[in-house]
């Protein structure tokens, strides 16, 4: 009887997981399918197969400008968020001081707050400070929402780090900064690279913050949103969306591979991740 209960319980859980994955990813699968359809409207049956919409993407100056802007914003936001994440993760995992948990909770707050509230709040702050809306303000907004993700990755790296290595470095006469640069950073390098990739992916796909904080220089999500108002532009949007989907998948896969390698290194050598 117990075995039957486990079988049915496991079967229901498996069915639920399968239905959940289908519900979540089935619409995404249609994106690359319709992006190679010869018809400009996404519908079945497909009228034919073509790569024309992909070939036309490099011929669109506005698209290239938006892609370049997204690259600038993504790299800047990922680097700044990771640098701040390193400092915050180091502080929270190494030191004990009043309000440490409260500070950690405030840093992670953007994960649970609605993005539109954050975007409006940042817009008001930027205007009060007299800053003109530009890629710089978009970078600031993306750093705010990327730091919690960076902290999640980096905190695990610093918590699993073997502190005896730092103590050994100090005993050999190395300074605190030298120990951090020569010992700590190389050991948590996989976590740092993973943080950079995750933050870049989040910045590349982020729309709400960019919508409120961008000026005349648009990013790729803003460009896509603008093109959706024109039916003739839809095939190009589908092709561009497919490329963004593939890029996001590749970046997140690389980040996960690095995280797992770091986890195995911890188990084998007592190093990086807990």
Image (tube, rainbow, N blue to C red):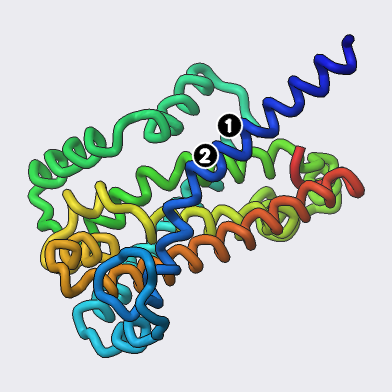
Q: Residue at x 16, y 68 (%)?
A: 231
Q: Is residue 274 above or below residue 129?
A: above
Is 104 left, or right, of 121 in this rendering? right
Is 98 left, or right, of 194 in this rendering? left
Taking the image as drawn, is residue 46 in sight?
yes
> Residue 161 at what x, y percent from top left?
76, 42
- Give the position of the N terminus as an image quadrant: top right
Local SS, label 1: helix
Q: Is residue 239 above or below residue 3?
A: below
In this view of the protein, which residue sits in the foreground, 62 or 88? 62
Q: Which residue is mark 2?
A: 88
Q: Residue at x 39, y 63 (%)?
A: 74
In this view of the protein, which residue sits in the foreground, 99 or 262? 262
> Residue 170 at what x, y percent from top left?
79, 47
Asked whether disc 1 touches disc 2, contact meaning CB atoms under 8 Å apart, the reply is: yes
Q: Is residue 156 above or below residue 41?
A: above
> Residue at the front extreme?
45
> Residue at the top extreme?
1
Q: Residue at x 38, y 68 (%)?
A: 45
> Residue 234 at what x, y percent from top left?
24, 69
> Residue 93 at what x, y percent from top left?
64, 33
Q: Which residue is mark 1?
A: 92
Taking the image as drawn, is residue 71 in sight?
no
Local SS, label 2: helix
Neighbour class for label 2 at 10 Å: few (<14), some, many (≥20)?
many
Q: What is the C-alpha distance between the residues marked 1 and 2?
A: 6 Å
- Give the position of the C terminus as an image quadrant: top right
Q: Is residue 158 above or below residue 32?
A: above
Query: In terms of image quadrants, where is residue 270?
Result: top right
In this view of the protein, which residue sits in the foreground, 87 or 122? 122
Neighbour class for label 1 at 10 Å: few (<14), some, many (≥20)?
some
Q: Residue at x 68, y 48 (%)?
A: 176
């Amino acid at each position: 009887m117990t075995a039957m209960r486990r079988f049915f319980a496991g079967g229901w859980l498996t069915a639920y997981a399968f239905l959940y994955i289908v519900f979540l990813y089935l619409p995404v699968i249609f994106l690359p399918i319709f992006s190679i359809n010869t018809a400009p409207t996404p519908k079945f049956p497909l009228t034919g197969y073509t790569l024309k919409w992909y070939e036309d993407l490099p011929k669109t100056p506005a698209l290239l400008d938006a892609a370049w802007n997204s690259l600038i914003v993504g790299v800047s936001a990922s680097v700044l968020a990771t640098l701040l994440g390193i400092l915050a993760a180091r502080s929270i995992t190494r030191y004990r001081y009043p309000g440490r948990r409260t500070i950690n909770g405030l840093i992670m707050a953007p994960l649970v707050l609605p993005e539109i509230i954050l975007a409006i709040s940042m817009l008001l702050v930027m205007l009060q400070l007299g800053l003109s809306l530009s890629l710089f303000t978009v970078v600031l907004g993306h750093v705010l929402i990327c730091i919690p993700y960076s902290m999640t990755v980096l905190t695990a790296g610093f918590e699993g780090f073997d502190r005896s290595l730092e103590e050994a470095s100090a005993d050999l006469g190395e300074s605190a900064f030298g120990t951090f640069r020569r010992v700590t950073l190389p050991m948590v390098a996989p976590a740092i690279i993973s943080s950079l990739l995750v933050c870049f992916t989040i910045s590349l796909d982020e729309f709400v913050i960019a919508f409120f904080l961008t000026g005349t220089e648009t990013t790729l999500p803003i460009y896509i949103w603008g093109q959706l108002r024109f039916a003739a532009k839809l095939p190009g949007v589908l092709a561009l969306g497919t490329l963004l989907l593939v890029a996001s998948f590749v970046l997140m896969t690389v980040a996960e591979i690095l995280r797992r390698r770091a986890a195995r290194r911890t188990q084998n050598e007592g190093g990086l991740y807990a």
